[in-house]
Image (cartoon, rainbow, N blue to C red):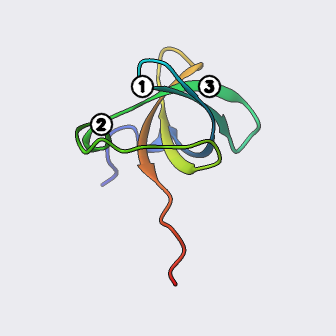
Amino acid sequence: MQAVGAEHRQRAVIEAVLPNGRYRVRLEGGRSVLAHLGGRARTDLVRLLPGDAVTVELAGLDPGRARIVGGARPPAG
């Protein structure tokens, strides 16, 4: 069983940090969307910088919006 919204998840890279906890992210396809932290990432006070790889969940009604649901794990070592 897939999680809700799993079909709308994509890999992305942070382009810019914007005011009010928002981020400009570039999706794998090259499209740029506005995203905010969602779920546990917001409560754990996650800090993201330009160039960080993340997983985003695209909004169903607005293709220009997304929610950041996870980050890439740093390389071991």
Amino acid found under the numbered disc labelled 1: Gly
Residue that label 2 marks: 42
- The residue located at (50%, 37%) in the rendering is 8
As displayed, is residue 53 above or below residue 15?
below
Residue that label 1 marks: 21
Q: Please tell me which residue lies in front, 41 or 66.
A: 41
Q: How far apart are marks 2 and 3 (CA)?
A: 19 Å
Residue 18, percent across and down? 54, 22
Q: In which quarter of the image is residue 68?
A: top left
Q: How far apart are marks 1 and 2 (CA)?
A: 9 Å
Residue 49, percent across and down? 55, 43
Amino acid found under the numbered disc labelled 2: Arg
Amino acid found under the numbered disc labelled 3: Val
- The residue located at (77%, 37%) in the rendering is 30
Residue that label 3 marks: 33
Pointer 2 local density, CA inside 10 Å: few below 14, some 14–19, many at least 20: some
